[in-house]
Image (cartoon, rainbow, N blue to C red):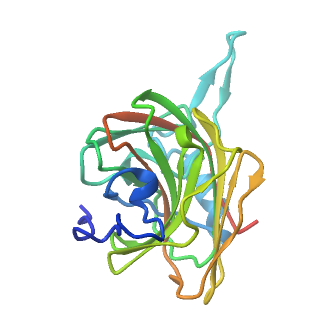
Amino acid sequence: MDPEPPAGSDASDSPSGGLSGFLGSTPRVIGAITALIGALSGLLLALNRAGILGDGGGTSPTAAQSDGTTTVAEPTPFGPNGQGGGDGEVQLKDGTLYVTANEPGHGVRVLADPESTSTSTTLTARARWVDGERDWSFALVCRFQGSKNFYLLGVIPIKRQYNIARYRDGRLTSLSGLQRSDAIRANENRVTASCFGKQPTTLTLKVNGETLPSVHDSNGLEYGNVGIRVGSSVGVVTCAFSELALTPPL
């Protein structure tokens, strides 16, 4: 289980707009999600189709159609084995990853297998509220080196807000500030997060077809893993992630 960053590290009172400003709580990141990227992405998809990763059932997940036929669901590089520690639940069903955060103020993070330390990657997902609190948030995580060093590209759907931030040595720095975008929807969003480059690192978030202003971090994290995070500051929430894909930067 990954330890929570030390108390006070979320800079909740900082005028720069700390991450707690958009999550409404001190984020606790749980588990580990890592991924094969770039040249290995094809191998990762093949392993998922073979049932070696993903749901581990030995066959590709299927979905029933209204005409009685079945179709093979798209494989995902994320699965329930990516969760660790904390109070939450992760299930993979028909190619969709369901993440439940049970403890208010503490999010659940899920990461893909196996580990990758690629410097550049793009993560795409369709994030959908399923049940629980409407006051919830989700984030795409990149260059995760441990619970004290990573990037978060976060969205608060109900408030139509986003924030791009960095943890370094347990200290939180908002790189974009808390921003509003009318492209963000309350219940379902298709999002793409890209992390690429070194000194500076460039972080880009795209929501429902709209590319938001990129952030350039001159003191950037140079490598690390990728993942997703779900949480609510007020209660239990369940979110579904579908159409998950890892590719080189767009």
- Residue 73 image offset from top left, x and y in percent: 63, 34
- Residue 151 image offset from top left, x and y in percent: 49, 69
The answer to whether residue 86 shows anywhere in this view is yes
Where does the C terminus fall, quadrant-wise?
bottom right
Residue at point 31%, 58% (across, down): 26
Residue at point 54%, 60% (across, down): 178
The answer to whether residue 143 shows anywhere in this view is no
Judged left or right of residue 236, residue 38 is right
> Picture quarter containing residue 184?
top right
Q: Nearer the viewer, residue 73 or 30?
A: 30
- Residue 179 image offset from top left, x and y in percent: 60, 57
- Residue 185, compared with residue 140, is above or below; it is above
Q: Nearer the viewer, residue 246 or 70?
A: 246
Total numbered labels: 0
Considering every residue shown, the one lying at the far top of the view is 67
Residue at point 47%, 63% (across, down): 34
- Residue 195 image offset from top left, x and y in percent: 62, 71
- Residue 138, compared with residue 10, is above or below; it is above
Judged left or right of residue 72, residue 23 is left
Residue at point 70%, 44% (across, down): 182
Where does the N terminus fall, quadrant-wise?
bottom left
